[in-house]
Amino acid sequence: MLSRVHVVVSGRVQGVAFRYSVERWAVELELTGWVRNLYDGRVEVVAEGKKDDLDELVTRLRKGPRLAVVEAIDVVWEEPTGEFRDFRLTFRGD
């Protein structure tokens, strides 16, 4: 069954390869969706896939890649839409 998670990560999460790590993890976990930097310094992730795989992604987001310092993570579970074909690194958002 398809699930969807919307996550915003705060801390030192830009300029430390955070988005690239998220993209790699999502592809490894066979998730679809996107990751982007926000203008305020946070990183936003929307992903769809199996619930267990999304839980694993959230666990990895809480830690972040080696150079990141995750201070807070906001996780919202949403209804899946099936709108994505793959997982993409996108450009900045609001």
Image: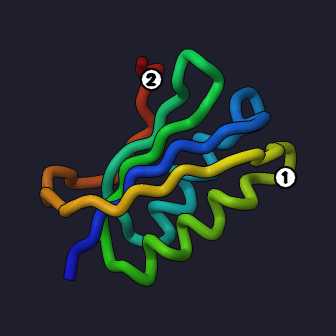
Task: Say which quarter of the image contains residue 69.
Answer: top right
Q: Quadrant of the C terminus?
A: top left
Q: Quadrant of the N terminus?
A: bottom left
Q: Amino acid at mark 2?
A: Phe
For the point 52% across and 24% down, the residue is 38
Question: Residue 85, how many percent across, how many down?
Answer: 21, 54
Callout 2 environment at 10 Å: few (<14), some (14 to 19), or many (20+)?
A: few
Q: Quadrant of residue 91?
A: top left
Q: Nearer the viewer, residue 89 or 73?
A: 73
- Compared to residue 60, the image places residue 15 above or below, namely above
Q: Examine the rendered structure and indicate whether residue 84 appears above or below residue 38.
A: below
Q: Position of residue 92 (x, y in %)?
A: 47, 20
Would you say the residues marked 2 and 1 are in contact, meaning their CB atoms lie under 8 Å apart?
Answer: no
Spatial separation of the CA atoms under disc 2 and disc 1: 22 Å
On the rendered structure, is 15 left or right of 33? right
Secondary structure of the residue carrying numbered label 1: loop
Of mark 2 and mark 1, the one earlier in the sequence is: 1
User: Residue 64: x, y in percent?
Assistant: 72, 54
Return the residue nearer the eye: 10 or 47: 10
In the rendered view, would you say 80 is above or below 74? below
Disc on res. 66:
1
Residue 91 bears which disc, if any? Answer: 2
The residue at 59%/41% (across/down) is 19
Q: Amino acid at mark 1?
A: Arg
